[in-house]
Amino acid sequence: MNDLSEGRVATIERKTKETEIFVSLDLDGTGEYDVDTGIGFLDHMLEQLSRHSLIDLKVRAVGDLHIDFHHTTEDSGIVIGEAVRQALGDFKGIRRYASAIIPMDETCTRVSIDVSQRPYLIWKVNFTKPKLGDMDTELFKEWFQAFAQNAGITLHIENMYGENNHHIVESCFKGLARALREAIEIDPRMADRIPSTKGKLGS
């Protein structure tokens, strides 16, 4: 049976020549966040992820922003993903599958996930502008790819329609948050079992 007495928590630090990332999280939190990546728009999205998933999240990132935002964006996805995977422990008892459809004004996005240790990203999201503020819109796919790969989840994101690029991105993060919240929740009927007929997750 999953021993939750110490909580499903993780703290990870990652240092390279390009970035230094610190992430601490609690999967069973209340959505409290303390985020500083040096990229205002990314901070806003990670705050949405925390609040709507109810994952308590602290992120500190120092990166080579004088070059561009690529390394900091991707590496934050890597470390947050690693922390989620670590906090999940033996994966026993989780619901595993979930999906969310998120409307935001004129925009609607569908997100489906399988917390399976089989990482994969399907990204059906298009933008009409190359940048949101100072951030390249192409970097959002990089963040979700890094997160999915390192969290070990299959992640499908499809923006069904929308015009405002800010709304499109935000609905993707909120969709991930809501789906993740449900998928990692402990099902009391499955609390001592791996959610797979194989007896293990992954290939």
Image (spheres, rainbow, N blue to C red):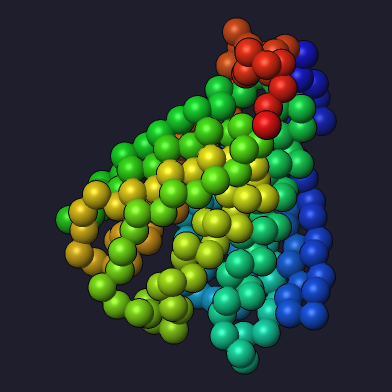
Residue reaching furthest to the bottom: 66
Instruction: Give coordinates of residue 131: x percent, y percent.
Output: 37, 80
Residue found 64% across the figure and 42% down from its top:
152
Residue 29 visible (yes or no): no
Q: Quadrant of the C terminus?
A: top right
Residue 192 visible (yes or no): yes
* Quarter holding residue 156: top left
Residue reaching furthest to the top: 189
Q: Nearer the viewer, residue 100 or 34?
A: 100
Residue found 54% across the figure and 62% down from its top:
143
Residue found 76% across the figure and 72% down from its top:
20
Residue reaching furthest to the front: 203
**Left or right of 124 on screen, residue 138:** right
Instruction: Give coordinates of residue 182: x percent, y percent.
Output: 50, 30
Q: Nearer the viewer, residue 7 or 20?
A: 20
Rendered position, 75 above or below 200: below
* Quarter holding residue 145: bottom right
Instruction: Give coordinates of residue 70: x percent, y percent.
Output: 57, 76
**Left or right of 43 on screen, residue 59:** right
Rendered position, 102 above or below 163: above
Instruction: Give coordinates of residue 187: x percent, y percent.
Output: 58, 16
Q: Quadrant of the N terminus?
A: top right
Residue found 46% across the figure and 30% down from its top:
98
Numbered marks: total: 0
* Quarter holding residue 7: top right
